[in-house]
Amino acid sequence: MPTPAERDDVVVLESASKVYRMGEVDIPALRDVDLRIPRGEFVAVVGPSGSGKTTMLNMLGGLDTPTHGRIEVDGVDITGYSERQLTLFRREKIGFVFQFFNLIPTLTAEENVQFAIELASRDGEPPDTDPRHLLEKVGLGERIHHFPSQLSGGEQQRVAVARALAKDPVLVLGDEPTGNLDFRTGKLVLGALKEMNREGKTVILVTHNTPLARVADRILHIRDGQIMEQEIVENPVSPDEIVW
Ligand SMILES: Nc1ncnc2c1ncn2[C@@H]1O[C@H](COP(=O)(O)OP(=O)(O)OP(=O)(O)O)[C@@H](O)[C@H]1O
Ligand SMILES: [Mg+2]
């Protein structure tokens, strides 16, 4: 077992809390969450609607900030980051895949991925990534010139996965990425996430679907803004084995 100092944790949350204020009412969305995720792990987050899953994911991706506590991503404390610093942090380090694909409708599949590569420029130099290669990886080599409206839901979501990979992110965050897909296309998207993970990416997947969470190495059960249980999956299943 590596000592804590030797562990390469990509994510560290220490007593992270989030309280949303709506008028006079405080809504605690996350309560004192402690979490460490080593590099290369595939983590699933499950829990009822309103339990704080998206809040936690958004915090890890720099889309939201904690009310109390500390967040570290890739060895950097981002707790006190300004909006501008968070924007740069997200561009450089985080690959997001959301439930609604958020592709740019006026750009083809290839251009959507190319755009993400350019956004991720470090020191003015875009990462040396070939959009076609990424689209081939998610099984869309034949669809690179299609616009989002000319792609099925599952194909659009796989473009979104390719786009998340474009910047060679440190962390891939999926918030219900299979949420509005049928069973077969959901599996393809999950397969693409597993493939990224095999190549060494750390993946965090939020899902309502408990059988689907078993593709992960570890399942976090969230309720009322707290991690109630952590389950190590001895033999993560492949997406093909899931009975939906
Ligand atoms: N911007 C916001 N302002 C006020 N309250 C919010 C905001 N975002 C989330 N909440 C509240 O925080 C709690 C946690 O919400 P969150 O979106 O994290 O839940 P979730 O687990 O992702 O649910 P779902 O499975 O439905 O997506 C909920 O009670 C929600 O109403
Ligand atoms: Mg949510």
Image (cartoon, grey):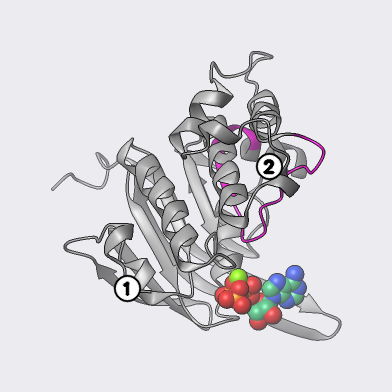
Q: CA distance from mark 1 to mark 2?
A: 39 Å
Q: Is residue 175 above or below residue 22?
A: above
Residue under numbered circle 2: 86
Badge number at residue 108: none
Disc 1 or 2, which lies upstream in sequence?
A: 2
Left or right? Give the position of 130 relative to 217.
right
Q: Residue at x 76, y 44 (%)?
A: 83
Point 64% across, 13% down: residue? 125
Can residue 215 be found in the magenta stretch?
A: no
Residues 70 and 182: in front is: 182
150 vs 213, left or right, is: right
- Residue highlighted by disc 1: 243
Position in image of residue 6 (x %, y %): 24, 39
Tell me the residue at 58%/48% (across/down). 155
Q: Residue at x 36, y 42 (%)?
A: 195
Q: Please determine whether, in this image, residue 133 is positioned above or below residue 221.
A: above
| Secondary structure found at label 2 | helix
Task: Classify 63 as above or below 230.
Answer: above
110 sits left or right of 3 in the view: right
Q: Position of residue 139 (x, y in %)?
A: 46, 39
Q: Is residue 216 left or right of residue 76?
A: left
Q: Which residues are magenta?
A: 91-107
User: Which of the two residues, 194 or 220, is positioned nearer the viewer here?
Assistant: 194
Quadrant assignment, res 55: bottom right
